Image (spheres, rainbow, N blue to C red):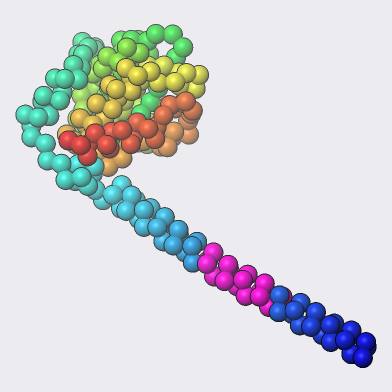
């Protein structure tokens, strides 16, 4: 009798153990299915976002993507508010027209001491260029200076000078951050240019050339998203 009870108890224990194992297997299967489903959903969402943004970058300008049609009067008002300073540059030979801006490329001057647009112009002339290679230069106090005409091909990013506008910001952003005055001026200038021209992307110099420019402390993503937000709110 005792033997039967022990045997029955063992059988019941074995049955319970098998039942628990099967239950654990079922739970693992359910968990795996749910995990696969969740990962699939995430991949679909990420793929969709990537497709939308890559399509926009390839095919659409910001102003077309957000359906912004700004009049010439409004653009002129924006330019006046930027208060862009003209400089009487003495240009060398070799300037070429025919620039049709589709991208903005951001640079830093990479200098630790103050540098005027005239300083950069002289440095670029000494390099054998026609003069200052950027189209705009933003000083530490946020003042914007004109460089090359917007329809003139720049000399700021090797193999990426055609159909781009080069914007340089005074400072070394490997060592320091962008100040608020410079950020505000850059966002306003970037917004204006993106509404004036079919700009499809705003890039740091390092994405088109092997360089650190505009520096590891430059808030590229923040600048780009701020410009896009300004465009959307126009």
Q: Does residue 153 appear in the picture of this structure?
A: no
Q: Is residue 220 left or right of residue 134?
A: right
Q: Quadrant of the N terminus?
A: bottom right
Residue 116: image quadrant is: top left
- In reply to whether residue 148 is colored magenta, the answer given is no
Q: Main secondary structure of the magenta part?
A: helix
- In reply to whether residue 25 is colored magenta, the answer given is yes
Residue 89: image quadrant is: top left
Q: Residue at x 44, y 14 (%)?
A: 111
| Position of residue 59 measured from the top left corner of the image (x, y, whole percent) | 26, 51
Which one is nearer the viewer's eye here, 30 or 185?
A: 30
| Position of residue 103 measured from the top left corner of the image (x, y, whole percent) | 29, 37
Vertical side of 7 occupied by 87: above or below: above
Q: Residue at x 68, y 78 (%)?
A: 22
Vertical side of 85 occupied by 1: above or below: below
Q: Quadrant of the C terminus?
A: top left
| Position of residue 28 measured from the top left corner of the image (x, y, whole percent) | 63, 70
Which one is nearer the viewer's eye here, 137 or 97?
A: 137
Q: Is residue 154 left or right of residue 214?
A: left
Residue 139: image quadrant is: top left
* Magenta stretch, residue numbers: 21-36
């Amino acid at each position: 009798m005792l033997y039967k009870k022990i045997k029955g108890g063992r059988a019941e224990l074995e049955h319970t153990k098998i039942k628990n194992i099967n239950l654990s297997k079922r739970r693992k299967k359910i968990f795996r299915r749910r995990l696969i489903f969740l990962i699939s959903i995430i991949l679909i969402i990420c793929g969709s976002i990537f497709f939308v943004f890559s399509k926009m970058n390839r095919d659409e300008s910001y102003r077309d993507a957000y359906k912004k049609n700004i009049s010439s009067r409004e653009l002129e008002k924006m330019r006046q508010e930027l208060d862009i300073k003209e400089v009487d540059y003495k240009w060398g030979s070799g300037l070429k027209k025919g620039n049709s801006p589709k991208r903005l490329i951001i640079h830093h001057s990479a200098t630790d001491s103050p540098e005027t647009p005239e300083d950069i112009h002289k440095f670029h002339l000494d390099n054998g260029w026609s003069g200052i290679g950027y189209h705009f230069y933003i000083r530490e106090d946020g003042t914007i200076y004109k460089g090359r005409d917007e329809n003139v091909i720049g000399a700021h990013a090797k193999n990426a000078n055609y159909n781009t506008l080069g914007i340089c910001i005074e400072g070394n952003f490997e060592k320091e951050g962008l100040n608020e005055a410079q950020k505000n001026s850059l966002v306003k200038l970037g917004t204006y240019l993106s509404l004036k021209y079919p700009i499809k992307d705003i890039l740091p110099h390092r994405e088109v050339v092997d360089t650190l420019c505009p520096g590891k402390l430059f808030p590229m993503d923040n600048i780009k998203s701020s410009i896009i937000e300004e465009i959307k709110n126009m």
